[in-house]
Amino acid sequence: MKILVINAGSSSLKYQLLDMKDEKVLAKGNCERIGEEESLFHYKTADGQKKDETLTMKTHVDALHQVVKALTDPKMGAVKNKKEIDAIGHRVAQGGALFSKSVHITPDAEAKIESLIPLAPLHNGPELDGIRACKEVFGPDVPQVAVFDTSFHATMPPKAYLYAIPYRYYEKYKIRRYGFHGTSHRYVSRKCASLMGRPIDSLKMITCHIGNGSSIAAIRHGRVIDTSMGLTPLDGFMMGTRCGSLDPSIVTYLMKEENLTPEQMDHILNEQSGMLGISEISSDDRDIMKAEIEGNPRAVLTHEMLVYQIVKFIGAYTAALGGLDCLVFTAGIGENQVSLRQNICRSLFYMGIEVDDARNHEMVGGKAGEISSERSRIPVWVVPTNEELLIARDTQDIVRRLQYAMTEDKTVVDPLDV
Protein backbone atom coordinates (compact mmCIF):
# COMPACT_ATOMS: atom_id res chain seq x y z
CA MET A 1 0.00 0.00 0.00
CA LYS A 2 1.33 3.43 -0.99
CA ILE A 3 0.23 6.24 1.34
CA LEU A 4 0.60 9.98 0.89
CA VAL A 5 1.00 11.83 4.20
CA ILE A 6 -0.09 15.46 4.21
CA ASN A 7 0.58 18.21 6.75
CA ALA A 8 -1.21 21.34 5.53
CA GLY A 9 -0.66 24.82 6.96
CA SER A 10 -2.25 28.12 6.06
CA SER A 11 0.39 28.83 3.40
CA SER A 12 2.27 25.54 3.27
CA LEU A 13 1.84 21.86 2.51
CA LYS A 14 4.36 19.23 3.58
CA TYR A 15 4.11 15.78 2.04
CA GLN A 16 5.66 12.31 2.10
CA LEU A 17 4.86 9.28 -0.03
CA LEU A 18 5.55 5.98 1.74
CA ASP A 19 5.49 2.41 0.49
CA MET A 20 4.13 0.51 3.47
CA LYS A 21 5.49 -2.80 2.22
CA ASP A 22 8.82 -1.85 3.80
CA GLU A 23 7.80 1.54 5.26
CA LYS A 24 10.18 3.25 2.85
CA VAL A 25 9.88 6.96 2.02
CA LEU A 26 9.64 7.14 -1.79
CA ALA A 27 9.58 10.93 -2.01
CA LYS A 28 8.94 13.96 0.14
CA GLY A 29 8.87 17.71 0.00
CA ASN A 30 7.18 20.97 0.86
CA CYS A 31 5.09 23.65 -0.81
CA GLU A 32 5.73 27.10 0.68
CA ARG A 33 4.11 30.53 0.34
CA ILE A 34 0.85 29.17 -1.05
CA GLY A 35 -1.35 32.10 -2.05
CA GLU A 36 1.52 34.47 -2.81
CA GLU A 37 2.71 35.60 -6.22
CA GLU A 38 5.89 33.55 -5.91
CA SER A 39 5.50 30.15 -4.25
CA LEU A 40 8.28 27.67 -3.53
CA PHE A 41 8.07 23.98 -4.41
CA HIS A 42 10.52 21.42 -3.02
CA TYR A 43 10.74 17.75 -3.95
CA LYS A 44 13.25 15.04 -3.03
CA THR A 45 13.35 11.38 -4.07
CA ALA A 46 14.56 8.41 -2.06
CA ASP A 47 17.80 8.30 -4.07
CA GLY A 48 18.57 11.96 -3.38
CA GLN A 49 17.35 13.67 -6.55
CA LYS A 50 16.00 17.15 -5.85
CA LYS A 51 13.73 19.67 -7.49
CA ASP A 52 13.36 23.22 -6.20
CA GLU A 53 11.12 25.56 -8.17
CA THR A 54 9.66 29.03 -7.88
CA LEU A 55 6.14 29.09 -9.31
CA THR A 56 2.63 30.21 -8.47
CA MET A 57 0.38 28.14 -6.22
CA LYS A 58 -2.72 30.15 -5.34
CA THR A 59 -4.47 27.39 -3.39
CA HIS A 60 -3.83 24.02 -1.76
CA VAL A 61 -5.39 22.45 -4.85
CA ASP A 62 -2.69 24.09 -6.97
CA ALA A 63 -0.05 22.82 -4.57
CA LEU A 64 -1.36 19.25 -4.73
CA HIS A 65 -1.37 19.36 -8.52
CA GLN A 66 2.33 20.22 -8.33
CA VAL A 67 2.89 17.35 -5.89
CA VAL A 68 1.16 14.91 -8.26
CA LYS A 69 3.14 16.28 -11.21
CA ALA A 70 6.42 15.68 -9.37
CA LEU A 71 5.44 12.26 -8.03
CA THR A 72 4.50 11.07 -11.53
CA ASP A 73 7.37 12.75 -13.41
CA PRO A 74 8.86 10.26 -15.95
CA LYS A 75 12.42 10.93 -14.76
CA MET A 76 12.11 11.74 -11.04
CA GLY A 77 8.70 10.40 -10.14
CA ALA A 78 8.00 7.79 -7.47
CA VAL A 79 4.87 6.36 -9.14
CA LYS A 80 3.62 6.04 -12.74
CA ASN A 81 0.32 7.76 -12.03
CA LYS A 82 -1.69 9.03 -9.08
CA LYS A 83 -3.89 5.92 -9.10
CA GLU A 84 -0.98 4.08 -7.43
CA ILE A 85 -1.60 6.17 -4.31
CA ASP A 86 -3.94 4.00 -2.22
CA ALA A 87 -4.76 6.37 0.65
CA ILE A 88 -3.98 9.76 2.17
CA GLY A 89 -3.21 10.43 5.83
CA HIS A 90 -3.56 13.92 7.30
CA ARG A 91 -2.08 15.48 10.40
CA VAL A 92 -4.89 17.37 12.15
CA ALA A 93 -3.98 19.43 15.20
CA GLN A 94 -7.17 19.58 17.22
CA GLY A 95 -9.52 16.65 17.76
CA GLY A 96 -11.08 18.19 20.86
CA ALA A 97 -13.33 15.93 22.88
CA LEU A 98 -14.80 14.50 19.66
CA PHE A 99 -11.87 12.34 18.52
CA SER A 100 -9.89 10.08 20.83
CA LYS A 101 -8.30 8.15 17.96
CA SER A 102 -7.51 8.43 14.27
CA VAL A 103 -10.54 8.23 11.95
CA HIS A 104 -11.60 7.62 8.37
CA ILE A 105 -12.64 11.02 7.01
CA THR A 106 -16.34 10.74 6.24
CA PRO A 107 -18.62 13.75 5.66
CA ASP A 108 -19.58 13.51 9.34
CA ALA A 109 -15.93 13.49 10.47
CA GLU A 110 -15.18 16.41 8.15
CA ALA A 111 -18.04 18.42 9.68
CA LYS A 112 -16.78 17.66 13.19
CA ILE A 113 -13.23 18.75 12.29
CA GLU A 114 -14.73 21.98 10.96
CA SER A 115 -16.66 22.49 14.20
CA LEU A 116 -13.35 22.44 16.09
CA ILE A 117 -11.81 25.31 14.12
CA PRO A 118 -12.53 27.82 16.95
CA LEU A 119 -10.25 25.76 19.22
CA ALA A 120 -7.40 25.78 16.68
CA PRO A 121 -8.08 28.43 14.02
CA LEU A 122 -4.48 28.50 12.77
CA HIS A 123 -4.38 24.73 12.31
CA ASN A 124 -7.73 22.99 11.76
CA GLY A 125 -8.88 25.42 9.07
CA PRO A 126 -5.83 24.95 6.81
CA GLU A 127 -5.78 21.21 7.53
CA LEU A 128 -9.40 21.01 6.43
CA ASP A 129 -8.41 22.89 3.27
CA GLY A 130 -5.84 20.16 2.66
CA ILE A 131 -8.43 17.42 3.13
CA ARG A 132 -10.84 19.06 0.69
CA ALA A 133 -8.07 19.75 -1.81
CA CYS A 134 -7.08 16.07 -1.75
CA LYS A 135 -10.67 15.09 -2.41
CA GLU A 136 -10.71 17.39 -5.45
CA VAL A 137 -7.33 16.30 -6.83
CA PHE A 138 -7.44 12.57 -6.07
CA GLY A 139 -11.20 12.03 -6.19
CA PRO A 140 -13.71 11.05 -3.51
CA ASP A 141 -12.95 7.33 -3.76
CA VAL A 142 -9.39 7.58 -2.40
CA PRO A 143 -9.76 7.04 1.37
CA GLN A 144 -8.46 9.76 3.66
CA VAL A 145 -7.61 9.43 7.34
CA ALA A 146 -7.22 12.10 10.02
CA VAL A 147 -4.58 11.57 12.72
CA PHE A 148 -5.00 14.06 15.56
CA ASP A 149 -2.26 15.71 17.62
CA THR A 150 -4.59 15.65 20.60
CA SER A 151 -5.90 12.08 20.51
CA PHE A 152 -2.98 10.42 22.34
CA HIS A 153 -3.64 12.76 25.27
CA ALA A 154 -7.31 11.79 25.48
CA THR A 155 -6.53 9.38 28.33
CA MET A 156 -5.82 12.25 30.75
CA PRO A 157 -8.18 12.23 33.75
CA PRO A 158 -10.36 15.28 34.53
CA LYS A 159 -8.10 16.25 37.45
CA ALA A 160 -5.32 16.79 34.90
CA TYR A 161 -7.19 18.34 31.99
CA LEU A 162 -9.58 20.73 33.75
CA TYR A 163 -8.68 24.33 34.59
CA ALA A 164 -9.79 25.91 37.86
CA ILE A 165 -12.17 28.36 36.21
CA PRO A 166 -15.99 28.20 36.52
CA TYR A 167 -17.04 24.75 35.37
CA ARG A 168 -19.71 26.25 33.13
CA TYR A 169 -17.01 27.43 30.73
CA TYR A 170 -15.89 23.85 30.27
CA GLU A 171 -19.47 22.79 29.65
CA LYS A 172 -20.18 25.68 27.28
CA TYR A 173 -16.89 26.14 25.42
CA LYS A 174 -15.01 22.89 26.18
CA ILE A 175 -12.12 24.87 27.66
CA ARG A 176 -9.71 22.27 28.98
CA ARG A 177 -6.21 20.92 28.52
CA TYR A 178 -5.97 18.98 25.25
CA GLY A 179 -2.24 18.74 24.65
CA PHE A 180 -0.45 18.55 21.30
CA HIS A 181 2.45 16.71 19.63
CA GLY A 182 0.53 13.55 20.52
CA THR A 183 1.61 11.78 17.33
CA SER A 184 5.25 12.35 18.26
CA HIS A 185 4.80 11.34 21.91
CA ARG A 186 2.95 8.18 20.85
CA TYR A 187 5.62 7.21 18.33
CA VAL A 188 8.69 7.78 20.52
CA SER A 189 7.17 6.19 23.64
CA ARG A 190 6.44 2.97 21.77
CA LYS A 191 9.71 3.04 19.88
CA CYS A 192 11.68 3.55 23.08
CA ALA A 193 9.87 0.70 24.85
CA SER A 194 10.74 -1.52 21.88
CA LEU A 195 14.40 -0.45 21.97
CA MET A 196 14.48 -1.17 25.70
CA GLY A 197 12.98 -4.60 25.11
CA ARG A 198 10.17 -3.93 27.57
CA PRO A 199 6.39 -3.86 27.12
CA ILE A 200 5.12 -0.29 27.21
CA ASP A 201 2.38 -1.26 29.65
CA SER A 202 5.09 -1.89 32.25
CA LEU A 203 6.74 1.54 32.00
CA LYS A 204 6.42 4.96 33.55
CA MET A 205 7.88 7.32 30.94
CA ILE A 206 8.41 11.03 30.38
CA THR A 207 8.82 12.04 26.74
CA CYS A 208 10.32 15.45 25.96
CA HIS A 209 9.50 16.79 22.49
CA ILE A 210 11.81 19.80 22.32
CA GLY A 211 11.92 21.86 19.15
CA ASN A 212 10.71 25.24 17.99
CA GLY A 213 7.43 24.07 19.48
CA SER A 214 7.85 21.91 22.58
CA SER A 215 5.89 19.76 24.99
CA ILE A 216 6.40 17.09 27.64
CA ALA A 217 4.13 14.13 28.34
CA ALA A 218 3.83 11.89 31.40
CA ILE A 219 2.97 8.38 30.20
CA ARG A 220 1.99 5.56 32.53
CA HIS A 221 1.67 2.10 30.95
CA GLY A 222 1.25 3.60 27.48
CA ARG A 223 -1.44 6.10 28.53
CA VAL A 224 -0.91 9.85 28.96
CA ILE A 225 -1.79 11.11 32.43
CA ASP A 226 -0.62 14.71 31.89
CA THR A 227 1.03 16.92 29.29
CA SER A 228 2.46 20.43 29.25
CA MET A 229 0.50 22.03 26.39
CA GLY A 230 -3.06 23.04 27.19
CA LEU A 231 -6.10 24.39 25.36
CA THR A 232 -3.64 25.62 22.73
CA PRO A 233 0.04 24.98 21.95
CA LEU A 234 0.94 28.16 23.84
CA ASP A 235 0.93 26.52 27.27
CA GLY A 236 3.84 24.71 28.90
CA PHE A 237 7.46 25.86 28.91
CA MET A 238 9.17 28.48 26.73
CA MET A 239 9.58 27.63 23.05
CA GLY A 240 11.01 29.30 19.96
CA THR A 241 8.52 32.18 19.94
CA ARG A 242 5.86 31.02 22.43
CA CYS A 243 5.93 32.16 26.04
CA GLY A 244 4.69 28.99 27.72
CA SER A 245 2.87 29.19 31.06
CA LEU A 246 2.62 32.58 32.75
CA ASP A 247 0.55 34.46 35.30
CA PRO A 248 -2.74 35.23 33.46
CA SER A 249 -2.75 38.72 34.95
CA ILE A 250 0.29 39.56 32.83
CA VAL A 251 -2.00 39.39 29.81
CA THR A 252 -4.59 41.84 31.14
CA TYR A 253 -1.91 44.11 32.63
CA LEU A 254 -0.02 44.45 29.34
CA MET A 255 -3.21 44.91 27.37
CA LYS A 256 -4.17 47.85 29.59
CA GLU A 257 -0.73 49.43 29.81
CA GLU A 258 0.12 49.03 26.12
CA ASN A 259 -3.45 49.52 24.85
CA LEU A 260 -3.33 46.19 23.01
CA THR A 261 -6.14 44.37 21.26
CA PRO A 262 -6.65 40.63 21.91
CA GLU A 263 -5.17 39.93 18.48
CA GLN A 264 -2.06 42.01 19.23
CA MET A 265 -1.61 40.32 22.61
CA ASP A 266 -2.01 36.91 21.00
CA HIS A 267 0.68 37.82 18.46
CA ILE A 268 3.10 38.89 21.20
CA LEU A 269 2.62 35.67 23.20
CA ASN A 270 2.78 33.34 20.19
CA GLU A 271 5.22 35.07 17.83
CA GLN A 272 7.44 37.43 19.85
CA SER A 273 8.03 35.63 23.14
CA GLY A 274 9.87 32.51 24.24
CA MET A 275 13.52 32.11 23.26
CA LEU A 276 13.25 34.94 20.75
CA GLY A 277 11.74 37.28 23.32
CA ILE A 278 14.37 36.63 25.98
CA SER A 279 17.45 36.43 23.76
CA GLU A 280 16.38 39.05 21.20
CA ILE A 281 18.69 37.09 18.89
CA SER A 282 16.61 34.43 17.19
CA SER A 283 13.96 31.78 17.69
CA ASP A 284 16.38 29.22 16.26
CA ASP A 285 18.29 27.41 19.00
CA ARG A 286 21.33 27.02 16.75
CA ASP A 287 21.69 30.79 16.57
CA ILE A 288 21.27 31.12 20.32
CA MET A 289 23.83 28.38 20.94
CA LYS A 290 26.33 30.17 18.72
CA ALA A 291 25.73 33.40 20.65
CA GLU A 292 26.12 31.59 23.97
CA ILE A 293 29.48 30.17 22.90
CA GLU A 294 30.50 33.72 22.02
CA GLY A 295 29.58 34.81 25.54
CA ASN A 296 26.28 36.62 24.93
CA PRO A 297 24.67 36.90 28.40
CA ARG A 298 21.09 36.89 27.05
CA ALA A 299 21.77 33.70 25.13
CA VAL A 300 23.13 32.14 28.33
CA LEU A 301 20.02 33.30 30.23
CA THR A 302 17.72 31.88 27.56
CA HIS A 303 19.19 28.41 27.88
CA GLU A 304 19.26 28.62 31.68
CA MET A 305 15.55 29.44 31.67
CA LEU A 306 14.75 26.66 29.20
CA VAL A 307 16.64 24.02 31.20
CA TYR A 308 15.10 25.20 34.48
CA GLN A 309 11.55 25.06 33.15
CA ILE A 310 12.01 21.61 31.58
CA VAL A 311 13.54 20.26 34.80
CA LYS A 312 10.53 21.51 36.77
CA PHE A 313 8.13 19.68 34.47
CA ILE A 314 10.15 16.47 34.66
CA GLY A 315 10.22 16.65 38.46
CA ALA A 316 6.50 17.33 38.68
CA TYR A 317 5.62 14.55 36.25
CA THR A 318 7.86 12.06 38.04
CA ALA A 319 5.85 12.79 41.17
CA ALA A 320 2.56 12.48 39.26
CA LEU A 321 3.66 9.14 37.80
CA GLY A 322 4.81 7.86 41.18
CA GLY A 323 8.30 7.16 39.85
CA LEU A 324 10.11 7.02 36.53
CA ASP A 325 11.41 4.15 34.41
CA CYS A 326 12.63 6.11 31.40
CA LEU A 327 13.29 9.68 30.21
CA VAL A 328 13.16 10.31 26.45
CA PHE A 329 14.36 13.25 24.32
CA THR A 330 13.07 13.84 20.80
CA ALA A 331 12.41 16.50 18.09
CA GLY A 332 14.91 18.94 16.59
CA ILE A 333 16.51 20.29 19.76
CA GLY A 334 15.94 17.18 21.85
CA GLU A 335 17.60 14.99 19.23
CA ASN A 336 20.58 17.24 18.52
CA GLN A 337 21.30 19.66 21.39
CA VAL A 338 23.95 17.74 23.34
CA SER A 339 24.61 20.42 25.97
CA LEU A 340 20.90 20.97 26.66
CA ARG A 341 20.38 17.27 27.39
CA GLN A 342 23.49 17.24 29.58
CA ASN A 343 22.39 20.27 31.58
CA ILE A 344 18.88 18.93 32.09
CA CYS A 345 20.19 15.59 33.30
CA ARG A 346 22.77 17.21 35.59
CA SER A 347 19.91 19.00 37.32
CA LEU A 348 18.22 15.60 37.78
CA PHE A 349 21.26 13.99 39.41
CA TYR A 350 19.34 13.81 42.69
CA MET A 351 17.02 11.29 40.99
CA GLY A 352 19.98 9.07 40.16
CA ILE A 353 20.14 10.22 36.53
CA GLU A 354 23.62 10.37 35.04
CA VAL A 355 24.56 10.88 31.38
CA ASP A 356 27.52 9.24 29.64
CA ASP A 357 29.29 12.09 27.85
CA ALA A 358 30.52 9.99 24.92
CA ARG A 359 27.11 8.41 24.33
CA ASN A 360 25.43 11.80 24.57
CA HIS A 361 27.70 13.31 21.90
CA GLU A 362 27.15 10.31 19.65
CA MET A 363 23.35 10.50 19.67
CA VAL A 364 22.75 13.29 17.15
CA GLY A 365 21.70 13.54 13.53
CA GLY A 366 18.90 11.00 13.61
CA LYS A 367 20.57 8.36 15.79
CA ALA A 368 18.58 6.53 18.45
CA GLY A 369 20.14 5.18 21.60
CA GLU A 370 20.64 5.32 25.34
CA ILE A 371 22.75 8.20 26.61
CA SER A 372 22.71 7.41 30.34
CA SER A 373 25.72 5.91 32.05
CA GLU A 374 25.94 2.43 33.55
CA ARG A 375 25.53 4.00 37.00
CA SER A 376 22.33 5.86 36.14
CA ARG A 377 19.31 4.56 38.08
CA ILE A 378 16.96 5.79 35.36
CA PRO A 379 17.73 5.17 31.67
CA VAL A 380 17.77 8.22 29.40
CA TRP A 381 17.18 7.79 25.67
CA VAL A 382 17.28 9.83 22.49
CA VAL A 383 14.65 8.63 20.01
CA PRO A 384 14.17 10.51 16.73
CA THR A 385 10.50 11.14 16.10
CA ASN A 386 8.75 10.03 12.92
CA GLU A 387 5.25 11.45 12.91
CA GLU A 388 4.78 10.81 9.19
CA LEU A 389 5.42 7.09 9.63
CA LEU A 390 2.94 6.86 12.48
CA ILE A 391 0.32 8.73 10.41
CA ALA A 392 0.94 6.31 7.54
CA ARG A 393 0.63 3.31 9.87
CA ASP A 394 -2.68 4.56 11.28
CA THR A 395 -3.92 5.25 7.76
CA GLN A 396 -2.99 1.78 6.55
CA ASP A 397 -4.63 0.14 9.57
CA ILE A 398 -7.89 2.05 9.15
CA VAL A 399 -8.05 1.55 5.37
CA ARG A 400 -7.46 -2.19 5.74
CA ARG A 401 -10.25 -2.46 8.28
CA LEU A 402 -12.45 -0.37 6.03
CA GLN A 403 -11.73 -2.69 3.10
CA TYR A 404 -12.47 -5.70 5.31
CA ALA A 405 -15.78 -4.19 6.39
CA MET A 406 -16.76 -3.53 2.77
CA THR A 407 -15.82 -7.07 1.77
CA GLU A 408 -17.83 -8.64 4.56
CA ASP A 409 -20.92 -6.44 4.47
CA LYS A 410 -20.75 -4.80 1.02
CA THR A 411 -21.36 -1.51 2.81
CA VAL A 412 -19.08 1.20 4.12
CA VAL A 413 -19.00 1.42 7.90
CA ASP A 414 -16.74 3.13 10.39
CA PRO A 415 -13.72 0.76 10.45
CA LEU A 416 -13.06 1.51 14.11
CA ASP A 417 -16.33 -0.16 14.96
CA VAL A 418 -15.30 -3.38 13.26
Image: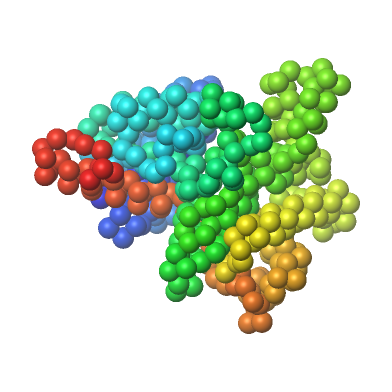
Q: In this view, does 396 lie above or below 121?
A: below
- Frontmost residue, 147 versus 49: 147
In this orientation, does residue 39 appear? no
Q: Single out the residue that lies furthest toward the front.
A: 167
Q: Give the percent coordinates (x, y) of residue 228.
A: 63, 47
Q: In this view, does 294 lie above or below 86?
A: below
**The image quarter in which residue 60 lies:** top left
Q: Give the percent coordinates (x, y) of residue 128.
A: 42, 28
Q: Is residue 274 above or below residue 335?
A: above
The residue drawn where x is 40% and y is 56% is 47
The residue drawn where x is 39% and y is 44% is 101
Q: Give the percent coordinates (x, y) of residue 303.
A: 78, 54
On the rendered structure, is 278 left or right of 409? right
Q: Give the percent coordinates (x, y) of residue 279.
A: 81, 44
Q: Is residue 371 above or below residue 68?
A: below
Image quarter hosting the C terminus: top left
On the rendered structure, is 252 left or right of 398? right
The residue drawn where x is 27% and y is 58% is 21
- Frontmost residue, 155 versus 40: 155
The residue drawn where x is 47% and y is 27% is 116
In this orientation, does residue 372 appear? yes
On the rendered structure, is 210 left or right of 131? right
